[in-house]
Image (cartoon, rainbow, N blue to C red):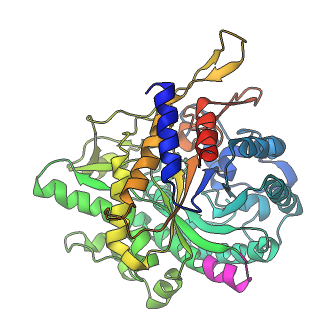
C-alpha cells in the first residue's frame, strides 16, 4: 500500500471503531524490564533457562532487555505520544516475591507504583497481568507442582490488597497454552521440559492458579475488572484425509479448547476415545478444582498471531517458536501455509483467521463469553533504520507492520459487525504487541515486534512509522 492509501484505510478503520473501543499497546515484564539483579529480585525460570547453552537463538539473556526498569518514564511518554487509551503490562512475580511467596518486596512495589503514577498522569488506563511466564525459580517443579497454583493465588491476593484501587483491568495468566506446550511439553521455552502429553498437569495447575487468583483478587476487594488471556489459533487439517482431520481436532483441543472450555463451560472437553488416555491428567480433575477454574469473568483476553495447519505423521521438529527434538517424536506435525506471506518469524500473515478465531469463540461459548479484549496482535519484521535524506533523522519504514495491524483490526471489526459470524461478541479493545522491540523468548533479540525501535547497545528508542499510524488512528476516531 502507498502512504496515502494507508492513511485512508486508517481513517476508514477509525470511523468504524465501536463507541468506547480502546486502543492500546502490550508488553511483559521479563521481555522489557532488565535489572534482573536489582532490588532483591529473585530468579525466574527464564533467567535460569537463558543461561543454559543453546536455549536462546542469539545466545542472549534478558539481563538488560530494553532497560525499561530505568527508562520507564520515557516509555510512558512514548505511549502518551501514541494517543492510546490502555497499557497492558505484566507484574514481575520474582521482583515482587523473590521466592514466589512471602511479603511483597519494597523495590518491586515502588517501581510499579511509579509506573501507575506515570500512567495516571498520562491518562492511560492499566491492564495488568499477574503472570506472563516468569515463574519464580524457587517454586520447585514450577507448574508441574500443584503447590504453584496455591502460591499464585496467594500472590494474587497480596497484589490485590496492594494495588486493588489502582488497576483498571487484571489479567491472571497470559497464554497458559504456550507455557504448557512450549515450556513443559516441547522444551522450546523455560523451563525446557519435554514431557509431551505428560505436560498436561502444568495446564491444569495454571488453570487452577487462574481460578484461585480470580477468587483472591475479588476477596481482596479490587476495584477493577478481572479476566484471563488465552491465545487462540484456528486449526485446519493439511488435507481432506481422515488422519489429518483427527490430528487437527486433537491440536485444537490441545491448543485452544482445554484452556477455554474449563474456564467458560465449567469442564474439560470430551476427548475422542483413541486419544482419551493421553488426557487423564485433565479428565481426572476433581469437581472442586473445576468449580474454582470456572469463576465468572468480567472479560476475555484474546491473543491472536496465526492459524495452525496440522498433518498426520511425524514431520520434523519445527514449532513457531523454535526447534524441538520432542516435536519430531509426535505422531503429527505442523504444516506450512505456502499461500500466505510471512512475518519475520516465518509466521503466516492471515488476518481472516482472526475473524475465524472470533467466530469460533462466539459459536463455542455464545452468551457465556464475557466482553472480549484483543490483548495482543502484532508481527515481527526485519526493520532497518534509514536516515531521512532531507534532515538526517532516523526513520524506520515498517509499512509491513502497519498493513499487518490494519488488516487484523479490519478483520476483527468485520467479524464482529452486525450479521457477521462473531456479531454476538462485545469487542472492547485492540492492544498492539508490542510497544518496544524486546527480548522475544527463545528467539532472543532476533525478532522485532515493536512500534518503537530499540537499539540494544545504547537503548535509544526510535518510533517507527507504525507508531505514527497508531497515533493517526487514535486521532481520527
Ligand atoms: C505471545 C506472547 C508475547 C510475545 C508474542 C510474540 O505468545 O504472549 O509475550 O512473545 O507472543
Q: Determine the image quadrant of residue 286.
A: bottom left
Q: Main structural element of the magenta stretch: helix, strand or loop? A: helix
How many numbered discs, if any?
0
Q: Position of residue 128 (x, y in %)?
A: 68, 62
Name the one closer to the observer, 237 or 288.
Answer: 237
Give the extent of the magenta segment.
213-223
425 vs 220, left or right, is left
In the rendered image, is residue 367 in sight? Answer: yes
| Residue 71 falls in image quadrant | top right
Q: Nearer the viewer, residue 473 or 212?
A: 473
220 falls in the magenta region: yes
Q: Is residue 421 magenta?
A: no
Q: For the point 61% across and 58% down, which residue is it? A: 132
For this orientation, the residue located farthest to the top is 389
Residue shown at 43%/27% (left/top)?
1
Choose between 91 and 188: the one closer to the eye.
91
Task: Residue 158: give x, y in percent of width and height.
Answer: 77, 75
| Viewer-proximal residue among 50 and 464 | 464
Q: Is 275 drawn above or below residue 75 in the view shown?
A: below
**Outermost bottom residue:** 288
Q: Position of residue 215 (x, y in %)?
A: 63, 83
Asked if residue 47 can be seen in this view, the reply is: no
**Left or right of residue 449: residue 99:** right
On screen, residue 144 versus residue 92, left or right, reads left
Q: Please state the horizontal and vertical placement of residue 238, each as a whole percent of the image.
A: 20, 47
* Lateral position of residue 283 relative to residue 389, left or right: left
Amino acid at each position: 500500500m502507498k502512504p496515502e492509501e494507508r492513511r485512508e484505510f486508517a481513517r476508514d478503520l477509525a470511523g468504524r471503531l465501536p463507541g468506547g473501543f480502546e486502543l492500546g499497546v502490550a508488553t511483559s515484564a521479563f521481555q522489557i524490564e532488565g535489572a534482573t539483579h536489582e532490588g532483591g529480585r529473585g530468579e525466574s525460570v527464564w533467567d535460569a533457562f537463558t543461561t543454559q547453552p543453546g536455549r536462546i537463538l542469539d545466545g542472549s539473556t534478558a539481563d538488560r532487555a530494553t532497560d525499561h526498569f530505568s527508562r520507564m518514564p520515557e516509555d510512558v511518554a512514548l505511549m502518551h505520544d501514541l494517543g492510546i487509551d490502555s497499557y497492558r503490562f505484566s507484574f514481575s512475580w520474582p521482583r515482587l516475591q523473590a521466592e514466589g511467596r512471602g511479603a511483597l518486596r519494597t523495590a518491586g512495589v515502588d517501581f510499579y507504583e511509579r509506573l501507575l503514577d506515570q500512567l495516571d498522569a498520562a491518562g492511560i488506563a492499566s491492564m495488568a497481568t499477574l503472570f506472563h511466564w516468569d515463574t519464580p525459580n524457587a517454586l520447585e517443579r514450577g507448574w508441574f507442582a500443584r503447590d504453584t497454583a496455591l502460591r499464585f493465588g496467594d500472590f494474587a491476593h497480596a497484589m490485590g490488597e496492594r494495588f486493588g484501587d489502582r488497576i483498571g483491568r487484571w489479567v491472571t495468566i497470559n497464554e497458559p497454552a504456550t507455557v504448557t506446550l512450549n515450556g513443559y511439553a516441547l522444551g522450546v521455552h523455560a523451563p525446557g521440559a519435554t514431557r509431551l502429553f505428560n505436560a498436561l498437569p502444568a495446564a491444569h495447575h495454571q488453570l487452577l492458579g487462574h481460578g484461585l487468583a480470580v477468587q483472591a483478587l475479588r476477596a481482596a476487594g479490587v476495584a477493577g475488572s478481572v479476566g484471563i488471556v488465552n491465545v487462540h489459533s484456528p486449526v485446519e487439517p493439511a488435507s481432506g484425509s481422515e488422519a489429518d482431520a483427527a490430528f487437527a481436532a486433537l491440536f485444537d483441543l490441545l491448543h485452544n479448547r482445554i484452556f477455554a472450555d474449563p474456564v467458560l463451560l465449567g469442564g474439560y472437553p470430551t476427548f475422542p476415545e483413541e486419544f482419551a488416555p493421553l488426557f487423564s491428567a485433565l479428565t481426572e480433575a476433581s469437581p472442586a478444582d473445576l468449580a474454582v477454574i470456572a469463576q465468572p469473568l468480567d472479560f476475555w483476553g484474546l491473543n491472536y498471531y496465526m492459524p495452525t495447519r496440522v498433518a498426520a505423521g511425524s514431520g520434523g521438529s519445527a514449532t513457531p517458536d523454535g526447534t524441538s527434538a520432542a516435536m519430531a517424536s509426535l505422531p503429527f506435525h505442523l504444516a506450512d501455509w505456502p499461500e500466505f506471506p510471512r512475518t519475520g518469524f516465518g509466521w503466516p500473515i492471515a488476518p481472516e483467521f482472526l475473524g475465524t478465531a472470533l467466530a469460533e469463540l462466539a459459536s463455542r461459548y455464545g452468551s457465556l463469553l464475557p466482553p472480549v479484549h484483543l490483548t495482543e496482535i502484532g508481527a515481527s519484521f526485519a526493520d532497518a533504520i534509514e536516515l531521512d535524506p532531507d534532515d538526517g533523522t532516523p526513520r524506520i519504514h515498517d509499512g509491513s507492520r502497519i498493513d499487518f495491524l490494519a488488516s487484523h483490526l479490519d478483520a476483527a471489526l468485520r467479524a464482529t459487525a452486525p450479521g457477521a459470524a462473531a456479531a454476538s461478541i462485545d469487542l472492547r479493545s485492540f492492544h498492539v504487541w508490542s510497544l518496544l522491540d524486546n527480548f522475544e523468548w527463545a528467539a532472543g533479540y532476533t525478532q522485532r515486534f515493536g512500534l518503537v525501535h530499540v537499539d540494544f547497545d545504547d537503548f535509544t528508542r526510535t518510533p517507527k512509522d507504525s507508531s505514527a499510524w497508531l497515533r493517526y488512528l487514535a486521532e481520527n476516531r
